[in-house]
Each structure stands twice: as structure tokens, then as C-alpha cells.
Image (cartoon, rainbow, N blue to C red):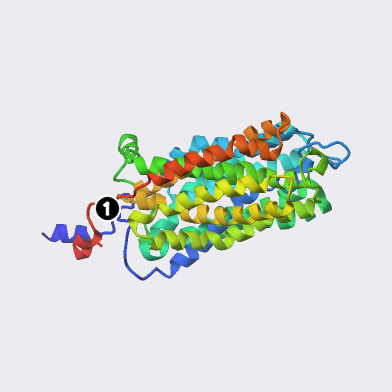
């Protein structure tokens, strides 16, 4: 009897711990963890999107592109963005097992080292296209690993009452990094070329990694030991969940629109001359267009998380449905060339959607995969897989532009029909409650 009592007093391994904790109090140190986790997370998309606002160093436009660039076409530029995602596709599900085997500290450390080394190689190699692509693949370690491990760490530290909001805030990692890139990279590139932008990201990631390792802790002072669902087969069983795969479809289309099209090609579209299907904006003005999307997203991300958190279980599908409906409108308006007012309306709608989608969809993963912390990690892996699949849409869209389609025509034949598919999938998402509420557990086991 004494042994049983002692066993109940021991903290449970994270794999079997109940992630749907309803205590009102959030541990004080959780806020420190959130800050340092956000900083290392932020470094990954900061590196991923550092090219977007200085595209003319990479896409060759006669008499416009500055000297010292790479002279790629639109599809080649899209492939630079996709390189980061390809390694993320490979790592999405292994990342969950890497978290279990190495622990969250080492997983996040390796992710950030990928950002640093991936930027360092092309920065030192100059205009060597092979080195640039190799660096982009290595940078994919950052997105591939941190996209699973960072929200898992946040999920473990924050109870149910605050988890949705904090995951929503964490989802600002992408829009905030894109905003910072939009604001500073054109000026840095003007002063020191594209290499200066790469060094800026390297320095930021290095500082963030040092801070993370200084302040890192896990709840209860234990290592991240996923030692219950310990083999591949048992973890794969967790994925036999219809709702997480419907959410996968929604999130993949969401990312295809946000990252694959808007974050990659909106500045290029705005800079393209009026005669060739754009608006002829300057580099700084075009970057500001994208920063409007991301700035609105900064506010909408935590709002999306908070709304998802407050909605009853049966109504949580409202968030993915809302994202799909907004997509249908914003992509119809954002890339047309007849009315600049409609373009800006589309940009504002995209900002709202980027926030609601980023902050409102990710918290659904642990809500759907609510059996255990390892289940939540696998849910995050599914969304990370969806994110990387969506990111790979860039060269598809860029290839259509190279083939002579206008930006609006390319949307009409791609993302708008996909948004209809996203809407259908969203309607059928139906998260299930846990079989056993926490209140039924013995007091000492909570």
C-alpha cells in the first residue's frame, strides 16, 4: 500500500501526463519558458523568410536586379523557399520521436544550430548557388524540429485555461519574424548586400540559443521522457484520428496560401511593373504591403488562440471554417490589377486570416489529440507536416507565373479551389472529449 501511495506521488512521465489540466494557476516560470522558447522559435522563420523582401538579389530582372545577386527565375526563387520545407516534411514525424529520445532542450538546440549553420554556409560562400541551396536545406532543420518541439514545451508548462492563448501568442513566431524581415532587411541589404541580412539572422539565432539554454527547465525538473508510448507502433496508433487529418488538410491549404503564395510572392507582385501585371511599387513600399499582413496577424494570432480556447468543444470547428471562407474572398481580391483598393482590402483580410488561422488552428491539435502529452506532440507533428507541405506550394505558383499566368489567374486555378476543399474538411472536424475527466483521478495523482 505504501508503495502504491509513493508511486502516486511521483510525477508522471510526460507521455502519460494529462495535458488537459484545469488548474487556474499557471506556474510563474512558465512565462520565462515561453519567452526563451519564442525567441528560438522566432529565429527559424526569421531565417526562412529573410529572402522574401530582398527578392531582386535572387530573382533576375533585367536592368532592375542589383549586382552581386543570383539571377534565378521565379520558380527557382520558389524552390529556395521550398528547400527549407522539404527537410521539414522529412522531419515532421521523426521530430516527435527525436523529442522523446533526446529531450526538448537538445531538439530545440539542434533546430537553432540548423538556422545558424544554414545561414553561415552561403554567407561565407558568396554567390555560389549550390552553397545557397545547401544552406537552405540545413535551415529546414530549424522549422522542421522547432515547429514540433517548441509548442510541445509550451503545452507542458501551461494549463488548459491559459494554453490556448499562449499557443496563439507563440504562433506569432512566423508573422512577427516576417514583419521584422520586412522592416529591416531592405535597409540592411541596401547597406551591406544580401550577406548582411544573412549575418543579422545568424547573430539573432546565436543570442536566442544562448538565452534558451541558460533558462531552460521542464515542469517538475525532469527531462522530457516520453517513456510510456515508447515504440513506433504505439505512437503511430495515436494518429488513427479522423479529425487530426481533417485539420491537416485545413492547415496545409492555409499554409499554401499564407506562406506558399502571400509571404513569398506578394512583395514581388507589388513590385512588378503595371505593364507586366503588377503595381510598380518600390521595394520598401512592397515590403510594407507584406508587413501590413503580418502586423494584423500579430494581433489576430493571440485573439485566435483565445477564441479557440473559449469555444465549446462542438463549436471549435468555427475557426477552420472561418479561415476557409475568408480565404475565398481575400485571394479573389488581393492579386487583381484593376483596383488598388480591393488589393488593400485583400491584404487586410489576409492579415486577419493569417492570425486567426495561425493562432486558432494550432491549439486545435492538442484539443483533438488529447490522450497524453505524446499524443499532443504527434498532433503538433501532423500540423508541422501540413505546414511543410503547404510551404512546398511556392514553386508551383511561381512556375505558373513563369509560364505566363498573371498572379490573379494563378490564384483562380490553385488556391481558390483549394479553399473550397479546406472549407469542406473544416465542416467535418469534430473534436471528441477525453474518456476520463481529470477530476476522477486520485488527488495525489493530479
Q: Residue furthest top?
A: 403
Q: Is residue 238 left or right of residue 72?
A: left
Please state which of residues 31 and 172 is positioned toward the viewer in this rendering. Answer: 172
Figure quadrant of residue 416? top right
Please state which of residues 384 and 273 is positioned toward the viewer in this rendering. Answer: 273
Residue 279, relative to residue 180: is it above or below? above
Question: Dot 1: few (<14), some (14–19), or many (≥20) neighbours within 10 Å?
Answer: some
Q: Determine if residue 227 is in view.
A: yes
The image shows residue 378 at horizontal and vertical percentages of 39, 44
Q: Residue furthest front?
A: 338
Q: Residue at x 13, y 61 (%)?
A: 2
Rendered-image quadrant of the C terminus = bottom left
Q: Residue at x 48, y 39 (%)?
A: 421
Q: Is residue 124 left or right of residue 66?
A: left
Q: Which residue is mark 1?
A: 434
Q: Residue furthest left?
A: 1
Please state which of residues 432 and 50 is positioned toward the viewer in this rendering. Answer: 432
Q: Is residue 85 left or right of residue 6?
A: right
Q: Residue at x 56, y 53 (%)?
A: 354
Amino acid at each position: 500500500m505504501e508503495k502504491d501511495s509513493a508511486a502516486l506521488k511521483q510525477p508522471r512521465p510526460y507521455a502519460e501526463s494529462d495535458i488537459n489540466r484545469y488548474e487556474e494557476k499557471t506556474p510563474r516560470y512558465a512565462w520565462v519558458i515561453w519567452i526563451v522558447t519564442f525567441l528560438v522559435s522566432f529565429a527559424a522563420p526569421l531565417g526562412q523568410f529573410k529572402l522574401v523582401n530582398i527578392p531582386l538579389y535572387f530573382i533576375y530582372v533585367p536592368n532592375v536586379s542589383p549586382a552581386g545577386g543570383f539571377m534565378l527565375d521565379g520558380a527557382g526563387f520558389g524552390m529556395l523557399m521550398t528547400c527549407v520545407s522539404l527537410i521539414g516534411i522529412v522531419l515532421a514525424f521523426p521530430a516527435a520521436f527525436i523529442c522523446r529520445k533526446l529531450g526538448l532542450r537538445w531538439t530545440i538546440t539542434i533546430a537553432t544550430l540548423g538556422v545558424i549553420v544554414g545561414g553561415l554556409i552561403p554567407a561565407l560562400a558568396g554567390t555560389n548557388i549550390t552553397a545557397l541551396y545547401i544552406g537552405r536545406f540545413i535551415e529546414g532543420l530549424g522549422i522542421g524540429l522547432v515547429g514540433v518541439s517548441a509548442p510541445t514545451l509550451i503545452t507542458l508548462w501551461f494549463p488548459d485555461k491559459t494554453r490556448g492563448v499562449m499557443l496563439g501568442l507563440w504562433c506569432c513566431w512566423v508573422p512577427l519574424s516576417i514583419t521584422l524581415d520586412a522592416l529591416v532587411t531592405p535597409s540592411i541589404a541596401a547597406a551591406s548586400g544580401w550577406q548582411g541580412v544573412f549575418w543579422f539572422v545568424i547573430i539573432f539565432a546565436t543570442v536566442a540559443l544562448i538565452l534558451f539554454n541558460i533558462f531552460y527547465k521542464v515542469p517538475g525538473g525532469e527531462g522530457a521522457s516520453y517513456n510510456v508510448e515508447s515504440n513506433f507502433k504505439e505512437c503511430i496508433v495515436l494518429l488513427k484520428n479522423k479529425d487530426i487529418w481533417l485539420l491537416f488538410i485545413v492547415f496545409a491549404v492555409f499554409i499554401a496560401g499564407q506562406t506558399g503564395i502571400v509571404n513569398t510572392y506578394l512583395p514581388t507582385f507589388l513590385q512588378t511593373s503595371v505593364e507586366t501585371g503588377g503595381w510598380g511599387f518600390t521595394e520598401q513600399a512592397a515590403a510594407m504591403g507584406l508587413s501590413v499582413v503580418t502586423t494584423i496577424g500579430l494581433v489576430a494570432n493571440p485573439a485566435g488562440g483565445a477564441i479557440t480556447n473559449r469555444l465549446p468543444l462542438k463549436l471549435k470547428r468555427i475557426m477552420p471554417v472561418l479561415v476557409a471562407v475568408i480565404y475565398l474572398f481575400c485571394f479573389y481580391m488581393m492579386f487583381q490589377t484593376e483596383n488598388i483598393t480591393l488589393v488593400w482590402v485583400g491584404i487586410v483580410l489576409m492579415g486577419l486570416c493569417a492570425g486567426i488561422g495561425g493562432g486558432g488552428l494550432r491549439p486545435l491539435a492538442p484539443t483533438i489529440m488529447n490522450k497524453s502529452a505524446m499524443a499532443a506532440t504527434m498532433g503538433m507533428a501532423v500540423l508541422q507536416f501540413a505546414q511543410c507541405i503547404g510551404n512546398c506550394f511556392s514553386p508551383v505558383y511561381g512556375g505558373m507565373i513563369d509560364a505566363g499566368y498573371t498572379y490573379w489567374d494563378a490564384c483562380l486555378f490553385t488556391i481558390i479551389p483549394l479553399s473550397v476543399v479546406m472549407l469542406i474538411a473544416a465542416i467535418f472536424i469534430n473534436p471528441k472529449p477525453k474518456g476520463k475527466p481529470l477530476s476522477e483521478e486520485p488527488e495525489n495523482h493530479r
